[in-house]
């Protein structure tokens, strides 16, 4: 598709839907209790309804069978503040789809079939305060920059997903975070979990269930234990494992030691050789003198 057509498509969609939805038409099978709310909860929808008024602010689409969000969706509905897509059939998010949601404050994508939250999914959704991503049982991957730009985010739900580990650097770009739900994931308490454990210990006031509400399985016997029975000491052995810098130091000092050894043995060998020649030479002189 040429770039021109790419650009025209949303524009045409915009024009046609603004013609269609002039006034305050309510999509069939949805309710519109006030001027800015469209409620299509539990209507057996298999796609986002057309003819939603463009100035909609609250769009309730939960308990349907919607498998994807059109990528120009939030370009069209740029006034959206509240979007509820809980309990649908979403299996992936296009990176462009949610990155234009500058007014969105509440987004519920819980109880879907998402497998991954890729980096950059939410773009610069600076207004977003609540983000629900729980109950996606196959969700096992969160991109390192998945939440970059969410500077207002206060509540993040990642409970009852398929996460075994979470790189805590994912949470670094969230200065406003007050509540984080992580319970109900198949967390693995191995050395990769050590950093997350330290982070959780320091931020336990942000966990609604506390450390006792989050369980992980032990690498030794697979036993499930609440995080509250573990301590920094439980990860003591992990400190013994070497980091990359440690490896470099070890390798480098190994090389230095071998170079030093080679230089030293070369020096020793040539000294010995020198002495041997010297003593031979003086013997020869003696012999010459004797003749
Ligand atoms: C999810 O949506 C389906 C389809 O509408 C409905 O039958 C089911 O009860 C909903 N589940 C929950 C937990 O609301
Ligand atoms: C959900 O995703 C998993 C893994 O990608 C797939 O095996 C399963 O069929 C999906 N379920 C639904 C209801 O789409």
Image (cartoon, helix red, strand yellow):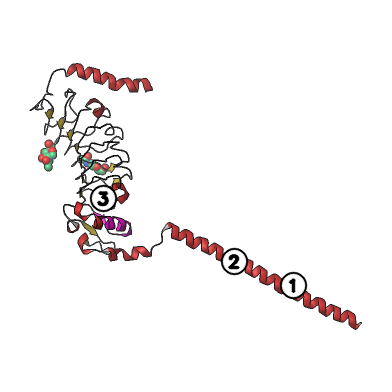
| Tag 1–tag 3 contact (CB < 8 Å) | no
> Residue 222 at what x, y percent from top left?
25, 61
C-alpha separation, residue under disc 3 versus residue under disc 2: 49 Å
**What segment carries the magenta color?**
185-199
In the image, what residue occupies the spot 44% across and 60% down?
246
- Quarter holding residue 174: top left
> Residue 137 at what x, y percent from top left?
22, 46
C-alpha separation, residue under disc 2 versus residue under disc 1: 21 Å
Disc number for residue 274:
1
Element assignment for label 3: loop
Disc number for residue 163:
3
Say which quadrant the C terminus sits in.
bottom right
Comes first in the chain, label 3 or label 2: 3
Check disc 1: other Cα within 10 Å, few if <14, some if 14-19, many if 20+. Answer: few
> Residue 26 at what x, y percent from top left?
11, 23
* Residue at the farthest bottom position: 290
Q: Choose between 125 and 116: the one closer to the eye.
A: 125
Say which quadrant the N terminus sits in.
top left
Q: Which residue is mark 2?
A: 260
- Foreground mark, 1 or 3, reads 1
In the image, what residue occupies the spot 74% across and 75% down?
275
> Residue 196 at what x, y percent from top left?
28, 55
Check disc 2: other Cα within 10 Å, few if <14, some if 14-19, many if 20+. Answer: few
């Amino acid at each position: 598709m040429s770039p021109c057509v790419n650009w025209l498509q949303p524009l045409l969609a915009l024009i046609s839907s603004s013609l269609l939805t002039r006034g305050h038409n309510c999509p069939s099978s949805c309710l519109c209790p006030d001027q800015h709310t469209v409620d299509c909860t539990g209507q057996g929808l298999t796609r986002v309804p057309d003819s939603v008024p463009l100035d909609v602010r609250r769009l309730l689409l939960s308990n349907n069978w919607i498998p994807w969000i059109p990528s120009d969706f939030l370009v069209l509905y740029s006034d959206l503040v509240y979007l509820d897509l809980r309990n649908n059939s979403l299996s992936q998010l296009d990176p462009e789809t949610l990155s234009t949601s500058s007014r969105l404050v509440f987004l519920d994508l819980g109880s879907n079939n998402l497998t991954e939250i890729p980096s950059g999914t939410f773009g610069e959704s600076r207004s977003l305060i609540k983000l629900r991503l729980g109950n996606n049982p196959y969700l096992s991957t969160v991109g390192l920059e998945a939440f970059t730009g969410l500077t207002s985010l206060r509540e993040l739900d990642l409970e009852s997903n398929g996460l075994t580990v979470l790189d805590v650097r994912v949470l670094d770009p969230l200065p406003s975070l007050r509540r984080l739900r992580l319970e109900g994931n198949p967390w693995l308490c191995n050395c990769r979990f050590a950093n997350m454990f330290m982070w959780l210990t320091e931020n336990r006031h942000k966990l609604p269930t506390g450390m006792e509400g989050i369980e992980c399985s032990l690498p030794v016997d697979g036993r499930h234990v609440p995080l509250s029975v573990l301590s920094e000491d439980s990860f003591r052995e992990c400190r013994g494992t070497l980091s990359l810098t440690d490896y470099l130091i070890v390798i480098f000092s190994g090389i230095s030691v071998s170079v030093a050894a080679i230089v030293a043995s070369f020096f020793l060998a040539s000294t010995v050789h020198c002495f041997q020649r010297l003593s031979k030479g003086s013997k020869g002189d003696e012999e010459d003198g004797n003749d």
